[in-house]
Image (cartoon, grey):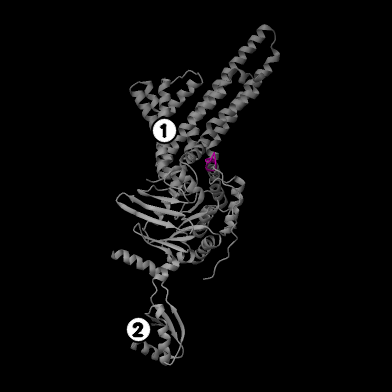
Amino acid sequence: MASTHLELYRRFTGKLRPRRMAFWPILTSGLRVLTKRKFPLLVLYAIPAIATIVFSFFVYGKFAAEEQLAPSLDGGFGLTRMLAKQAMNMLEVKNQIIEFNIQMRLFALLAAAWFGSGLLCEDRRVGAHQLWFARPLTKLDYFLGKFLTAAFFGACAVLVPGLVICLVASFSSPNWSFLREEGDVVLKTLAYGVIWVTLVASVTLCASSLAPRRGFAMMGTFGFFVALDALAKVLGSVRDEPDLFALSPLMAVRQIGYVLFDKESTWPGITPWLAWTTVGVVTVGSLLVVAWRLRRLEVVR
Amino acid sequence: MSSPVITLLGLTKHYGAVRALSGLDLEVRPGPVGLLGPNGAGKSTLIKLLLGQLAPTAGQARIVGQDPSTARGRLDVRRNVGYMPEGECLIPGMNGVDLVTTLGRTAGMTKRDAMTRSHEVLDYVGLEEQRYRGLEEYSTGMKQRLKLAQALVHDPPLLLLDEPTNGLDPHGRRHMLDLVADLGFQQGKNVLICSHLLPDIEATCRDVVVIHRGRLLKTGSIEELTRREEGRLVARVAGGAQERARFEAELAAGGIVFENEGLDLKIQLEPEEGDRLFGLARDAGTALTLLKPELSTLEDAFLGALIGEDVA
C-alpha cells in the first residue's frame, strides 16, 4: 500500500505546569463559544442595556440639575434648601438603583438559563467530557469553569448594569457625595448581584446536569422558578400567610434585596430569615446535585 | 528489558451482572502495542480504566508508574497520556485551533505555547487548511485527525487511541495508519491502539494484546504470534506442468501432504525438514525455485485464539 505524505512531527520543548486556575481555559472557551451566538445576546441584553442607559441618564440628570441649582442659592435659607434638595435627590437616586437592581433579576435569570443550560448536558451528549476528563483537571476545576460561565451571563444582566449606574452616580454627584454618603449602595449592589447570580447559575447547572439536552435543561430551570413562584403565590394567598411567599426564590431574593438595601418592603412581608433560608437551601441543594452528577461524569463507579 | 508502561494486576470491572473485564494480569512493553479483540471484548473499558474514567471493581492498574484509581494518580496519568476517544466528542461551536489550544492549556501549557503547538500538530495530522473551520463542518476523517491532534498537543509519552480508523474511507484510513505508525516507530511514542481490525494492528504495532470477553487470550510480539502458527512450507517447482506433476508424485510417494495454490505448492512439513524437498525435486528431474515457511497472518493467530477460547 502506498503511504501518504506526512508532515514532520515536532517535539514540544516547553514545560507543562500544573495550573492553579485550571478552570480558566474552560471558562474562556465557554464564553468564546457562547458569545458567537449574536442574536440571543442582542435579544437578552437589549432591555438591560437600554434600562442601564436610561437609568444612567436619569441619575446623571438628577445630579447635574442639582449642581446648576447650587450657585443660584445663597444665604442660610438657600443653603438649607440646597442640602435638603441634595438629600432628596440622593434618596431618589438610591431608590432608583435599588429598584433597578431588583427588577433586573429576571433578565439575569433569562440570560443565565439561556446560555448556561447546555453547559453540562451538551458536554455529556456529545461526549466532550471524555476530552475534559482526559486532562489533568479536577471535578472542581471543571465545575468552576462551567459555573463561572453561567454566572458571567447572569452577572452581565444584573451585576454589571447595577455597577455601571453606581459608577455614573459616583462620577456625576458633586464632590463624590454619592460615594461618601451612599457608598455602601455599591457594595450592596455587588452583594445582591452575587447572591442572585449564584442562585441562578446553581439552579441552571443543576438542571443541565440532570437533563439530556439543552432545551430540557432550560425548561427545567424556568419551570423550577415559575412553578415555585406560582405555588408560593397560591399558598400564600389562600392561607393568607405572607411567609409562604418565601417558597418562591424570586420573591425571597426580592425580599433579600430590600433587606440588604434597608428599604421597606411593601409586599409581601416575608420574614428575612425565611428568605435567606430559601435562597440557601436552593443554592446548596442545586450544588449538591451538580457535585453528585459531576462525580459520575468524571469517574463511573 | 525496559520497564513496562502499563501493568495490570487482576484488573476486574463489572457493570452489574455483566463482567467487562475479569482479573486481567498484563504487562505492556514500551512501543506501539495493539489491543485487539472483537466488539464487546472490553477494550474501551480497559482504556477508560487506565485513564481513571472508570473505577475498577477489583485489582489494580499502573500506567506510566501511576495508579489511576487515586485522585492524585489520575491527574499524573492524564498529564502523561494523550487520549483519542472512539466516538463523537468534539465541542460544537469551536474551530480546530480553538479546540486543540484549549485542551493544550488544560494540560498545563501557556497560552502562547498551546497556540503554537496547536498549529504544529494540526499541520502534522494534515488539517492545516481546515484549522479555522467550525467543527460542525468537519468530515469524519477530519474529526478523527483532529482527535489525534488534541491527544498529541502536550506531546505525551503515551497515547491511548481508541479505534482510530473508525468510519474512515480507505484513503483516510491509510493516512491515519501512517500517522500512528510514524508516531510509534519513528517518533518513539508508546502507543496503545485499541481496534478490532487486524490489518490496522499489523500495520502500526510491534506487540499485540488479544482480549476476549474481558479475559486475556494472547500477548506478545506480532512476529512471535505469527511464527508460532507456522507449520507449512511454500514451494515452487522449476519447469512446466510435467515437472510439477512428477514432483507431486514424489511427494505423494513419500507420504507428504500438500495442496496446490496457484503456482505454488503448500506442503505440510516443518521448516527443518525442508531439505528433503530438494532431494525429492532432484528425483523428479526438476529443481525448486522457491522454498519458504508459510507464516500465518495475525488473523489466523487471532481466530485460533478465539476458537480455542470458545471451545474452552
Q: Which residues are magenta?
A: A19-27
Q: Position of residue A289 (x, y in %)?
A: 40, 37
Q: Nearer the viewer, mark 2 or mark 1?
A: 2
**Chain name for mark 2:** B
Residue flagged by tag 2: what amino acid is it? Ile
Quick one: label 2, few (<14), some, or many (20+) residues within 10 Å? some
Residue under the image location 41 percent in, 72 percent down: B296
Q: Quadrant of the C terminus of chain A?
A: top left
Label 2 residue SS:
loop
For the question of whether residue A44 can be seen, the reply is yes
Q: Assess whether residue A24 is covered by the magenta stretch.
A: yes
Q: Position of residue A177 (x, y in %)?
A: 63, 18
**Horizontal side, residue A85 vs residue A110: left or right:** right
Q: Assess whether residue B265 is covered by the magenta stretch.
A: no
- Label 2 and label 1: CA atoms lie apart by 86 Å
**Horizontal side, residue A106 vs residue B214: left or right:** right
Read off the residue under disc 2. Answer: B256
Picture layout, residue A190 above or below residue A120: above
Picture layout, residue B125 above or below residue A29: below
**Extreme residue toward the top, this view:** A76
Picture layout, residue B41 above or below residue B276: above
Residue under the image location 63 percent in, 12 percent down: A83
Residues tagged by mark 2 and mark 1 found on one chain of the structure: no
Q: Position of residue B273 (x, y in %)?
A: 39, 80
Read off the residue under disc 1. Answer: A225
For the question of whether residue B95 can be seen, the reply is no
Q: Are marks 2 and 1 in contact (CB under 8 Å)?
A: no
Residue flagged by tag 1: what amino acid is it? Phe
